[in-house]
Image (cartoon, rainbow, N blue to C red):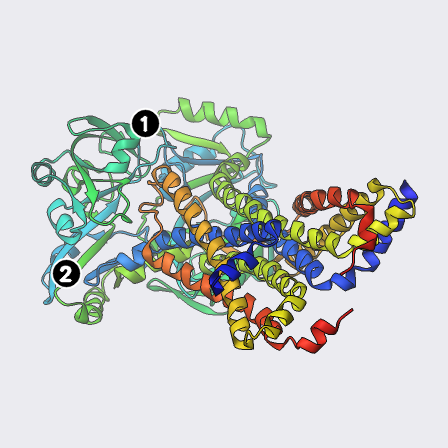
Amino acid sequence: MFKQTSAITLMNLRSLPQRAGMSLATVLSIALVVGVLLGFLAMANGFQKTIDGTGSEDVAVILRGGSQFELNSVLSADQFRIIETAPGIAADADGQPLVSAELYVVVDGIKKDLGTEANLPMRGVGLQAPSLRGQFELTAGRMFEPGSNEIIVGEAVLDAFEGFALNQTIRLGTNDWQVVGLFSTGGTVFESELWADIGVVQNLYQRGSSLQSIRARLTSPDAITELEAFADNDPRINELDIFNEQEFYASQSGTLTTVINAVGWPLAIIMAIGAFAGAWNAMYSSVDARMREIATLRAIGFSGGAAAMGTLIESLVLAAVGGLLGAVGTYLLFNGASASTLGSGFTQVVFAFAVTGDSILAGMIMAVMIGFLGGIVPAIRSAYVPLLTVHRSE
Amino acid sequence: MNDLTLIRKNLFRKKLRAILLTLSILIAFFIFTIIGSFNRVLNAGVELAAADRLITMNNSGFTQSLPYAYWGRIQAIEGVRNVSHMSWFGGYYQQPTQVVQTFAVDPETYLAAYPEFLMPDDQRAAFLTQRDCLLVGETLALQYGWSVGDRVPLLSNIWQKTDGSSSWEFDICAIYTASVPEMSTAAAYLNYDYYNEALAFNQDRVGMMVVNTDDPMANDAIANQIDAMFANSTAQTDTATEAAFTQAFINQIGNIGLILVYIIGAAFGIILLIVGTSLVVAISERTREIAVMKTLGFPAPRIFRMVLIESVMLSLVGGLAGVGLATLVLKGLAPVLAAFMPGLVVTPGIFGMALAMMIGFGLITGIGPAMNAHRVRIVDALGKQ
């Protein structure tokens, strides 16, 4: 049985060039289906990866109670000074608490792909800010000088927005800024931000001495409870929300990833039905074309099962080649491509398309399923080819 | 037996093949119709934007507000018919996840700026006069089971009152519907004065202005005049037409147009491959038959035409079924998605485009086989074997 099957399979595959048109159409249509699926998954995965990588579990993000996003929050300088004295916060080498007061405003950047304005976050920070981001690294230039109109620019911003090259001067709203450095934070959301001195931002955006968020490095992830207890018991600070930074960002990725998956999967499955009809049609024609050949094989002793397996395997091979082609094509076209969208904080998050191993596997499974379902009926049909077809004249 | 009968018989001579090809064509037009309809609603804001409406914002970005006094100053500009303002309230109901799109507005000028808001006269009067009135959209009212006369508290994730609370009490005194189906009725509007007087900070500031001009031709001049008026102040402005403002907002989500082109391209690429090759095979199977027809006196152009009509017919059968199925699915989805995608239907425009594509697709897939049939030479075809 196995020998018969492999003999017929080889014969089928060698004769594929005779049916080149339809076989190629099957392969390419399956490649397109897999390409669409992988394109969507690469978008969802890329966005998810950026958000998931953001935030560390031993950093606390402190916002005004009920404000949900940094953009909505307002905190006072007094609150900041009190938080600096809170327990559970780690200190740097000089014994200073690792706490960063940050102001988050939105400026208009020009998106490279569409040429229209989009909300770009500008974060006013102190010199402590880098030490609260695990992988912060200045990749070019230098840090901004406190008190000056200088910004450092996240590398993702550079990819997706116009005019942020090193040493360039850029006008944002009514103010001119000098780009003095580029920074990377290991592919996290912070790379979609512009950083400037908090004092300058407070002044230019008329925010007095107010801030929007406080970040604090904790002595351990569990120390957040000490900080919470302190904030609850001190009457001088109003209600605050204290989040574990990692969870704070994780909770924000949900909607978009869900939407992309909710659009991508049904779309790919519906397209797969179209490709399945195509594969069935192609295999049906393939059996049609080989009628006499199959009958001859049956007459000289090959089993119907072997003929069926031969047909099914032909279909599976075409599908697998299609799936592979789709995966390679998507990888070459999209992997690493930079895109940006509106994150839940109402500002742009730049991310890179990520074609992952898991999604390639999902695509291949889909391709093979199309091949199996498209090939199964023609395969059964080829098992029942009447022997007399040998004599059928054209 | 006329040509059409012959074409029909030819089309369905191999039933399974005809069904499979119809199915794959159906899928492509189904996707086209669904995506086209979603895209239309998504971009409806741009299409529906009133020609005479301008939006003025702080040019430092949308989080920066404008002084309340600008309202009066813009009104004084010649050619300006009406000015209103709106401020984002950051509202939610009961818990932060139940977001309610809420704006604080000046009721009278706002309803004048947006005649799309429809409501009974007594409710309109209540919204204009009652300070703690909340004007609620039909979809939103349905979502929370609100009706006129209900008292509801809305919380703000941005603003606080002088007493430290973030909760404003409202009396739902009006429910609006929209004069255009594509306009969202999932938002709520409250009286600016009622909100402003309780604010703990950022008092006497507004989010943005809506300016109606007398003549759309003067839009550019008036926009420039507004921006010039505040050029040397602490809050400079950026004025654009409503259409441009809406387009920029949609573009923030991403390059949706490009994604749609890829999807629809892939969908049609698939059927072009499948149907195109199948028809070539189908016609070449009939070579001898075509030769017989030619022998009987059928002229080549007539055969050419018959093959072409056959492929167009196949495309129309599958395509119309696809559009039909999409229409049904959208009918089911529309009520569910009313809050995000109001007015989700297959419009005559989309149907017309689909129809044109069906005919185009039929011609493209049929032209090759038709030419082959046209070229069949009796001697060669009948001489075979």
- Which residue bears the numbered disc 1? B94
Vertical order, A196 against A377 (above or below)? below
Is A394 on the left or on the right of A140, as rendered? Answer: right
| Dot 2 and dot 1 within a common chain | yes
Q: x%, y% of residue A162?
A: 47, 66
Chain where mark 1 sits: B
Q: Is residue B243 left or right of residue B13?
A: left
Q: Earlier in the sequence, mark 2 or mark 1?
A: 2
Residue behind mark 2: B74
Dot 2 surroundings within 10 Å: few (below 14), some, or many (20 or more)?
A: many
- Can residue B344 be seen? yes
- Depth order, front residue of A203/A248: A248
Helix or strand or loop: what does disc 1 sit on? loop
Could you tell me which chain the residue with mark 2 belongs to? Answer: B
- For label 2, the SS is helix
Q: Is residue A123 in view from this perspective?
A: no
User: Relative to the observer, which residue lies in front, B240 or A67?
Assistant: B240
- Residue neighbourhood size for the residue with mark 1, other residues' Cα within 10 Å, grouped as few (<14), some (14–19), many (≥20): few
Q: Nearer the viewer, residue A387 or A33?
A: A387
The type of residue carrying mark 2 is: Ile
